[in-house]
Image (tube, rainbow, N blue to C red):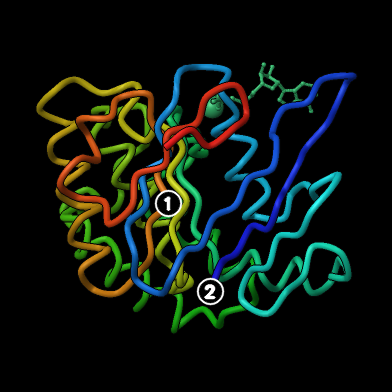
Amino acid sequence: MIQLKDAWFRAGGHTILQGINLNVNLGEFIGIVGVSGAGKSTLLRLVHMEIRPTRGIVLVDNLNSATAEPDDIAIHRRKVGYIFQDFKLLEDRDVYANVAFALWATGVKRKRIKKRVFQVLAEVGLSHKRYAMIPRLSGGEQQRVAIARALANEPFILLADEPTGNLDPDNTREIMGLLQRINRKGTAVLMATHKAELVKGLASQIMQIHDGRISG
Ligand SMILES: Nc1ncnc2c1ncn2[C@@H]1O[C@H](COP(=O)(O)OP(=O)(O)O)[C@@H](O)[C@H]1O
Ligand SMILES: [Mg+2]
């Protein structure tokens, strides 16, 4: 489903990724583990096709980084969920609007939007907070909103970039449990973290990344 074949990425005179080979199958949970600056976020951006490798190939769901047109990439991105350490929510909107926005942006009809927003908020256990403003939520709740937004368009894969980096241990456990449930329902998860223990036992594959190289 996702394949990186000898993928390199150079920018600003630096080699950020070197000769990355990676295979992700449908429904897998992959941990990308490495210290800050190792190249984890850059790897996720390649899979999202925000950037293209400067050498080698990235194949995602029938798209080839060497030939994909911008329109195809835009369509591809709708089928990829993305969550971040800092949540990246619209702070001046409520929970409902944050999730609805993802659907509205892809042209879903209003009635269907409401149904789907309620559905994904139930999945992440936030139905009771649907009209709460973002700053009134705890960090764990904010990440759950971000996960609901990422799931709204039924992605085949969820990219998670240090999703628990801003959370305390209790919220970290809760978010990891949620990611595991989402994965068990069939969504592949590709999670970058500097904490190997978070993905141990959960991930079907753990890739260690060091200075832009897969090291084990
Ligand atoms: N577009 C870019 N231009 C120059 N340097 C970059 C670019 N993107 C990332 N880097 C550098 O590449 C290294 C790896 O970055 P990143 O993928 O964000 O690592 P990680 O997510 O593991 O912390 C860092 O040193 C970062 O500053
Ligand atoms: Mg990063």
Q: Position of residue 138 (x, y in %)?
A: 23, 28
The residue depicted at 35 percent of the width and 69 percent of the height is 187
Q: Position of residue 70 (x, y in %)?
A: 86, 65
Q: Quadrant of residue 71?
A: bottom right
Residue 15 got which mark?
Answer: none
Q: Is residue 18 left or right of residue 192?
A: right
Q: Position of residue 165 (x, y in %)?
A: 35, 23
Q: Position of residue 131 (x, y in %)?
A: 30, 50
Check disc 1 and report its element: helix, strand or loop: strand
The residue depicted at 30 percent of the width and 74 percent of the height is 186
Given residues 197 and 112, the one toward you in this image is: 197
Label 2 vs 1, first from the N-terminus = 2
Q: Is residue 197 left or right of residue 158?
A: left
- Residue under label 2: 1
Given residues 150 and 4, the one toward you in this image is: 4
Given residues 212 and 111, the one toward you in this image is: 212
- Work out how far the residue at label 2 is from the one at label 1, CA to CA, in angstroms: 12 Å
Check disc 2 and report its element: helix, strand or loop: loop
The residue depicted at 45 percent of the width and 72 percent of the height is 156
Quarter of image, ligand 1:
top right
Q: Is residue 109 left or right of residue 119?
A: right
Q: Is mark 1 within 8 Å of ligand 1?
A: no
- At label 1, the amino acid type is Leu
Residue 88 vertical position relative to residue 34 in the rendered view, above or below: below
Residue 41 vertical position relative to residue 63 in the rendered view, above or below: above
- At label 2, the amino acid type is Met
Q: Quadrant of residue 149?
A: bottom left
- Residue under label 1: 190
